[in-house]
Image: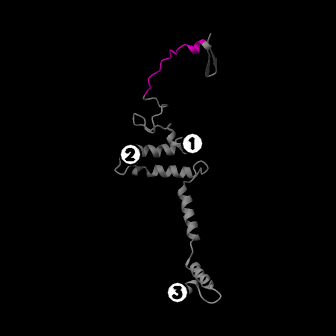
Amino acid sequence: MSYCKQEGKDRIIFVTKEDHEAPSNAELIADDPNDPYEEHGLILPNGDVNWNCPCLGGMASGPCGSQFKEAFSCFHYSKEEVKGSECIDHFRDMQECMQRYPELYPQDDETDSSSQEAESRSALPTEKDSTAATSTAEAAVSADGTSPTDEQTAS
């Protein structure tokens, strides 16, 4: 014989083997298109932003969540010819907030790649370095005073 037990917010249902063998008589409820907890993607059917969408990566919550929502909403509902052009101040506020929390909002790879480019430029030979390389090559002339190119042209 099956029975239910309530523990706080949880309801525990104990069933017998016979209960499991009988076909289910549960009826499925049709999906509610306006259910905010249902997965609808970024934009809900009514056109609103789904702040629970995992595609936002948690940006709508946290210390800069309100600034993110302001900026994103402004852009989403923008009617300007250049979409979002009136939202620059909102995005600036969001960026300033994120810069105050670098451990939560690390800088993107753009800054990393620009510092790597600067390092690679400093590793490139300068005019002074190429002059030194030329004199090193000239010093590599063989003991008899001829370089390999001289021998090749002589033959």
Q: Could you tell me the amino acid type at mark 1? A: Gly
Task: State the CA–CA distance, disc 3 to disc 2.
Answer: 73 Å
Compared with 18, 122 (above or below) is below
Compared with 135, 59 (above or below) is above
Residue 89 x, y percent position in the rendering: 46, 51
Instruction: Give the magenta range.
Output: 18-32
Residue at the image point whose x is 43% and y is 35% from the top: 44
| Coloring applied to the structure | one colour
Residue 121 numbered mark, or none: none
Q: Are marks 3 and 2 in contact (CB under 8 Å)?
A: no
Residue 79 x, y percent position in the rendering: 35, 46
Sequence-first disc among 2 and 1: 1
Taking depth in this image into account, of 142 and 40 the one nearest to the observer is: 142
Q: Could you tell me the amino acid type at mark 2? A: Ser
Give the residue at mark 3: 153
Compared with 47, 136 (above or below) is below
Taking depth in this image into account, of 40 and 107 the one nearest to the observer is: 40
Residue 30 x, y percent position in the rendering: 44, 23
Secondary structure beneath dot 3 equals helix
Residue at the image point whose x is 60% and y is 88% from the top: 146
Q: In which quarter of the image is the N terminus?
A: top right
Give the residue at mark 1: 62
Q: Could you tell me the amino acid type at mark 3? A: Thr
Sequence-first disc among 3 and 2: 2
Look at the image and say whether residue 112 sits in the magenta stretch.
no
Q: Give the prevailing secondary structure in the magenta stretch.
A: loop
Residue at the image point whose x is 50% and y is 42% from the top: 56
Taking depth in this image into account, of 107 and 121 the one nearest to the observer is: 121
Give the residue at mark 2: 78
Residue 145 x, y percent position in the rendering: 62, 90
Sequence-first disc among 3 and 1: 1
Compared with 50, 5 (above or below) is above
